[in-house]
């Protein structure tokens, strides 16, 4: 496990994208709550500011595209592992133009397993990595069932941090020079009980970041950035 997690969470750059005004009315969603565009913009600005100013990452900000209302959710466009990026093919037809201009595609040699997800949009709707070998996982039946499957598939033993709210389990972990273990997570206003659970992570720098508006269009904290550890010679 120690070898597998060596360097886990080390990042130098973050790719983000500006929030289009079209998000409020045209972004894909499973619910019907109205988005307050001004508040959504304030939330996103704070998210980017934390990455850039508080954590010192080099932030690459792409411009918004009003024709692509979901484009702020850049995590859906690429999966980064080491120095390799896999450009995805979004399931929604309306989102495929987000990746059409990305032509530097490399194949990688990693084993991939499929985890069935029931009653939720995707896996990160109820889990994410909160540290090396530490999975933040929701308490719902769907989340716990997926966790059991992951444990059966894996050759490694992971610790778990169980949160009463599934959506709160989506958090952003980083290990940064001079900062140490950093975790962006839900605010007490959104999920008070889950926020208390995060406070158990005494060795982490805990940074609550609000996501009350973007969650209305199924966006989570991890959705809004692609984190990269860029080598000095690249």
Image (cartoon, rainbow, N blue to C red):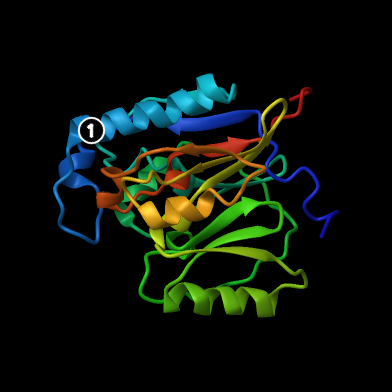
Depth check: 167 or 92 in front? 167
Q: Is residue 131 above or below residue 63?
A: below
| Label 1 crowd (10 A; few <14 / some 14-19 / many >=20) | some
Residue at screen point 45% across, 49% down? 76
The residue that mark 1 highlights is 39
Residue 5, position in %: x, y?
A: 77, 52
Q: Quadrant of residue 64?
A: top left
Residue at screen point 35% across, 32% down? 44
Q: In which quarter of the image is residue 93?
A: bottom left
Q: Considering the image in quadrants, where does the N terminus appear?
A: bottom right
Residue at screen point 57% across, 73% down? 147
Residue at screen point 55% across, 31% down? 14
Q: Quadrant of residue 82?
A: top right
Q: In this view, does 147 lie to the left or right of 185?
A: right
Depth check: 184 or 123 in front? 184
Q: Considering the image in quadrants, where does the C terminus appear?
A: top right
Depth check: 164 or 13 in front? 164
């Amino acid at each position: 496990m120690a070898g597998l997690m060596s360097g886990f969470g080390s990042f130098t750059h973050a790719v983000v994208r500006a929030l289009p005004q079209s998000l409020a009315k045209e972004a894909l969603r499973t619910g019907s709550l109205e988005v307050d565009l001004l508040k959504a913009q304030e939330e996103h600005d704070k998210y980017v500011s934390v990455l850039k100013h508080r954590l010192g990452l080099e932030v690459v900000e792409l411009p918004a595209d009003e024709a692509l209302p979901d484009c702020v959710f850049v995590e859906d466009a690429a999966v980064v592992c080491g120095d390799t990026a896999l450009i995805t093919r979004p399931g929604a037809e309306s989102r495929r133009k987000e990746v059409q201009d990305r032509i530097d595609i490399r194949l990688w040699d990693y084993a991939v397993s499929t985890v069935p997800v029931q009653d939720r949009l995707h896996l990160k709707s109820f889990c994410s990595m909160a540290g090396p070998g530490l999975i933040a996982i929701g308490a719902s039946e769907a989340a716990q069932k997926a966790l059991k499957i992951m444990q059966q598939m894996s050759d490694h033993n992971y610790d778990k941090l169980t949160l009463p709210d599934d959506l709160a389990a989506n958090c952003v972990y980083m290990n940064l020079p001079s900062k140490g273990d950093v975790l962006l997570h839900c605010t007490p206003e959104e999920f008070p009980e889950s926020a208390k659970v995060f406070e158990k992570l005494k060795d982490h720098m805990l940074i609550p970041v609000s996501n009350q508006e973007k969650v209305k269009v199924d966006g989570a904290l991890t959705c809004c950035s692609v984190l990269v550890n860029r080598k000095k010679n690249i």
